[in-house]
Image: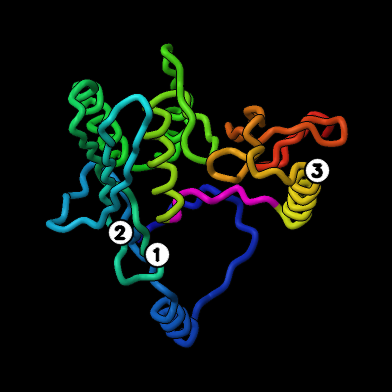
Amino acid sequence: MTHKIDKKIISYKVLNEDDKKAAETHAEQAPKAIDRESMNENVSRPEILFGSTYKIKTPQSEHALYITINDMILNMGTEHEERRPYEVFINSKNMEHFQWVLALTRVISAVFRKGGDATFLVEELKAVFDPKGGYFKKGGVFMPSLVAEIGCAIESHMKQIGMLKDKELDDHQKQFLAAKRREFESLHSDTSALDETGSFPAKALLCGKCQTKAVVLMDGCMTCLNCGESKCG
């Protein structure tokens, strides 16, 4: 068989039988590439999915919402095993939002099944603001809308299955916040000055970074006792 050489020859070697056998042995011993399964729209739904249900109770409704996220386990039994969301359902006795909630679950489920990086959904949902105004969750965390809290539930689930990582404070920041908390508590020992959860001062302001009512005036500087955000740097 004739082969056309269209590149400059820089070296050559004549292979003998020993060289051919060594090359074949090396090819047999070389690890084979693993065909890793990834989420895509052609993956068929198995009979059983593993999921978690999250309860959302807002002051805007007497009925709670229950968000169920079902996951598919890819590459089961291998070192590349991973858990990825496949579908989401939202149920509630409150039928006021039924139409848009149903549409939202179908769109989110379609994005999950499409594959790729679906973590962008979290920030998109959390950025939705209700023109009628938001509300505060337990712990002083501000929710700009019900859609934003659905985004927070999905974020919690993604962190649980390893798709998202917690942005934890480093040791220096934790020590700084702990010192600030002790300093504030020594100046305000009256428990009536705390909110209903006892976590932060009742008169604390809302932090623009972590959306938690935990900003207090310390040493002439507005400082968040939850995330450490400070106007003084």
Q: Contact (CB < 8 A) between labels 1 and 2?
A: yes
Circle 1: element type: loop
Q: CA distance from mark 1 to mark 2?
A: 8 Å
- Quarter of the image for residue 65 reads top left
Q: Position of residue 160 (x, y in %)?
A: 42, 55
Is residue 117 visible from the viewing direction of this image? no
Q: Amino acid at mark 1?
A: His
* Rendered view: 26 above or below 178: below
Q: Position of residue 185 (x, y in %)?
A: 75, 47
- Quarter of the image for residue 209 reads top right
The residue mark sitting in front, 2 or 3, is 3
Q: Position of residue 142 (x, y in %)?
A: 52, 30
Reading the image, the residue beneath label 2 is: 74
Q: CA distance from mark 1 to mark 3?
A: 53 Å
Q: Amino acid at mark 3?
A: Leu
Circle 3: element type: helix
Reading the image, the residue beneath label 1 is: 80
Q: How many numbered discs, if any? A: 3
Q: Amino acid at mark 2?
A: Leu
Is residue 154 visible from the viewing direction of this image? yes
Left or right placement of residue 144 versus residue 106 in this view: right
* Magenta highlight range: 162-169
The residue mark sitting in front, 1 or 3, is 3
Q: Position of residue 39 (x, y in %)?
A: 31, 48
Upstream in sequence: badge 2 or badge 3: 2
> Which residue lies at the image location 46% right of the left edge and 51% below the top edge?
159
Asked if residue 163 lies in the magenta stretch, the reply is yes
Asked if residue 54 lies in the magenta stretch, the reply is no
Identity of the residue furthest to the bottom in this view: 18
Circle 2: element type: strand
* Rendered view: 1 above or below 107: below
Reading the image, the residue beneath label 3 is: 187
